[in-house]
Each structure stands twice: as structure tokens, then as C-alpha cells.
Image (spheres, helix red, strand yellow):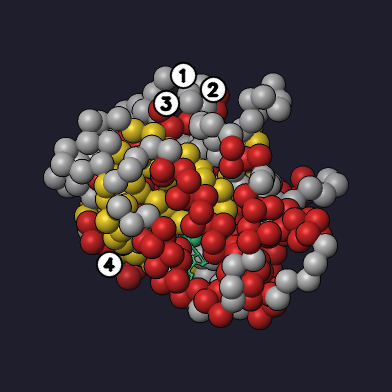
Amino acid sequence: MPSSIYIGVISGTSMDAVDCALVDFNGGKPAQLDFINTEIPDDLRQKLLYLCEDHNNQIPLLGETDVEFARLLALSVNQILEINGLKPSQIAAVGSHGQTIRHMPHQNVSNYPFTIQIGDPNTIAELTKITTVADFRRRDLAAGGQGAPIVPAFHRKIFSSAENDRVIINIGGMSNITVLKKTGEISGHDTGPGNVLMDLWVQQHLGHPYDKDGSWASTGKVDEDLLSSLLDEPYFKLPPPKSTGRELFNQHWLNSKLAELNQAIAPEKVQATLLALTVQTIKNAIQKELNKGQIIVCGGGAYNSALMQELAQSLPSFEVMPSSRLGVMEDSMEAVAFAWLAKQTLSEQPVDFTDITGSAHPVIAGGVYFAGKRVLRNTY
Ligand SMILES: Nc1ncnc2c1ncn2[C@@H]1O[C@H](COP(=O)(O)OP(=O)(O)O)[C@@H](O)[C@H]1O
Ligand SMILES: [Mg+2]
């Protein structure tokens, strides 16, 4: 009998770690068997960040980092196998998102919109001996979609409810929402920055990778002038479908907004304002869709208690809860989603992203890199 166990592996915009989930789909619903984080070595992280910016002739670095990062993804997969005493033959497939280094889906800006995720799937299949599914976004883009966000399709599978209107908020480096109405309608988009600007700012001023529990932000007061200047960004006013990334919301964007204001603001106030920006943009996006319902939060931002508190206070007619209350851990949601997407791809099941990404029709997302059981038997 074919295995029902899949592995999902991803590193998001934050580049905080590789997330790897071992998931059993026996019985239809995903059961998480294990979840691990694999650290991204600092020099590799620096290369990935460099590839997210515009520099001359990055092609050799791109080629090398594609393979270097794939080796780290394979290491993570092999670690989770070893910890759980599993053999490659017991896993149906790895679903690998890779690392986004450029996301340019804007059909109105270029005739040739594109998105690039690296982490060579050939390398993963070779080093893990497991069939690997990757490149999940580009088929949707080819069908006229944004290629992002795509995890809402998984949210629909596991969180749809006939009793409650629900919003799933994923607060990663960027933040995205999925609105699941009890009537069955789905919508969603990237709301803008999640943690990425807060991470940059606390790194720059305190040298910490992130502001644990939002404790530094809590020491400052929101600067209303800065907040309204940040909110003035045209992206926030664009109608969906829309998606975004580090191409827009980066150090340069923040610095130019601060420079425009022409007045010094204490760093902790800036941090408080960046937290308020994340909350405000999520709130505005939700209020366009619903007046009340349940809010389910996932992504690393769900562990930022100050952020969670602000969110709950600014949306008092909603019941706000972390996703773990409904059975999926906050930090593993996306890795589990890519395990599910790999399963859909292997069984040639189209996934319907149309209401989210704007693509013309459902697509079979992902390319398959077979482990090649016969080849492997002879070679290894
Ligand atoms: N205890 C915490 N307090 C505040 N922020 C946190 C905490 N834990 C995680 N985070 C935030 O979550 C981010 C990682 O979230 P994640 O969902 O992995 O994002 P991505 O999908 O972009 O990788 C970290 O960079 C950090 O900003
Ligand atoms: Mg992450």
C-alpha cells in the first residue's frame, strides 16, 4: 500500500529557520507526527538575503545557493527521518517550498511576471532518496494568478466551518489572511508586513533576531505621524488579488519613510509603530470582509504576545485564538500545508487558488522529482 506519510519543508520570508513537518494523511485529516526547525547558518542566510536584493550579476551566487540551500533542506528531512526511525521508502513524498528570493507577480507592471523559489529539488531527491515535489507557485502564475498566497487552500480544507465565519491570519515575515465564510466563500491576500520590519529594526538597534513577545515594542508609544505615513503606502489600498514581499517592505522602505518625516523618533517608538502597522493593516483587511466571527492566528507572530493583545483589542467583535486551539501548531502550519500540497500534486489533484490569487482555473501545483525507486535500488 502506498504510504500516507509526507514531509513538508519551508523557509518563509523571515528566514528564521527551515521548518520541517512529518505528517500522516491516513484518514484524510493531517496528523502531525513531528516538527523540527533546522538552523540556517549565518553565511547562507546572508547569501539568501543578498539574493533578495538587486545587485549586478548574481547568477553564479544564485546557482550555488540553490544547491547549498537544497542541501540544508535535505539535511532537515534526513534529520526528521532519523529522529523518528523512518526509512525513505516509508515516505510518499517531500513537499518543498524552497526560499523565495524574488516575487514579481504584478501583471500590470510586466508582461512577464515571475516568482523564484530556490532549493534545488533534484538535490533534495538525490540526498533524501524521497520523491520531491517543489515549485508550487509558478503554475498558478502561468495561469494568470499571483502565485501567492497559496496556503489559504489548505486553510479551507482544515478550518472551514458551517457555524462560524472565520479568518485565518498567518503572521510570518509578511502577513496574509484567509477569509472563510460559513456560506463556503473564500477570499484572502497578503496584507503587508508581518514581522519582517520589526525583525529588521530590533536587529539594527538591539542586535536581537526578533523582539521576543513584543517586549521592546511595549516600552514605546506609537508615533501617529509615522504610522499614518507608513499606512499611506499604495499597496495597502490595492484591491485583491495581491501579494507582496521583501521587494517592497524592506529596510530601504522603512528608512525612506523615516527620512520623509524629518524628525527623530526614539527607536522603541518606531518598534511600537511597526507593531501597530502590522495590526492596523490586518484589521483594515478583515473589516472589509466581516464584522464578527472567529480569528485563528498562526505563524511566528502568534507567539508575539503584545501583537496578539493589540490584535484582540482592535477587533473586539471577533473571538481571537491561536491555531493550536484547533489542532494545528502555529509554527508548523505552512510546513504541514506543503506536505498536503505535495500529496495533491502526486495524486494529480488540481488545487483551486482562483479566488485568492486570481488565476484563471485550478492548477496542479508543483513539479515532481521522482526518487526513482529502481534507480536507487541499483545505485545505493
Ligand atoms: N516569542 C516570539 N515573540 C515575538 N516574535 C516571535 C516570537 N516567536 C517568533 N516570532 C516571530 O516570528 C518570526 C518567524 O515567523 P515565521 O512564521 O517562521 O515566518 P516566515 O514564514 O516568514 O519564516 C520571527 O522572525 C519572529 O519575528
Ligand atoms: Mg519561518
State the residue at coordinates (63%, 25%).
107
Q: Position of residue 57 (x, y in %)?
A: 83, 45
In the drawing, what numbered circle is on residue 85?
Answer: 4
Apparent side of residue 73 relative to residue 4 in the rendered image (left or right): right
Residue beneath label 2, please? 144
Apparent side of residue 180 relative to residue 125 in the rendered image (left or right): left
In the drawing, what numbered circle is on residue 360?
Answer: 1
Q: Nearer the viewer, mark 4 or mark 3?
A: 3
Q: Position of residue 262 (x, y in %)?
A: 83, 62
- Mark 1 neighbour class, 10 Å CA radius: few under 14, some 14 to 19, many 20 or more: some
Judging from the image, what secondary structure is the residue with disc 3 in? Answer: helix
Type of the residue with mark 1: Ala
* Dots 4, 3 in contact, CB < 8 A: no
Q: Determine the CA span between mark 1 and mark 4.
A: 43 Å
Q: Residue furthest top?
A: 360
User: Is ligand 1 closer than 8 angstroms to the Cβ of mark 2?
Assistant: no
Residue beneath label 3, please? 354
Judging from the image, what secondary structure is the residue with disc 2 in? Answer: loop
Judging from the image, what secondary structure is the residue with disc 1 in? Answer: loop
Q: Determine the CA span between mark 4 and mark 2.
A: 43 Å
Q: Determine the CA span between mark 4 and mark 3.
A: 40 Å
State the residue at coordinates (52%, 50%).
281
State the residue at coordinates (69%, 53%).
229
* Among numbered discs 1 and 4, the one appearing first in the sequence: 4
* Dots 4, 2 in contact, CB < 8 A: no
Q: Nearer the viewer, mark 1 or mark 4?
A: 1
Q: Is residue 213 above or below residue 301?
A: below
Q: Report the number of numbered marks.
A: 4
* Among numbered discs 2 and 1, the one appearing first in the sequence: 2
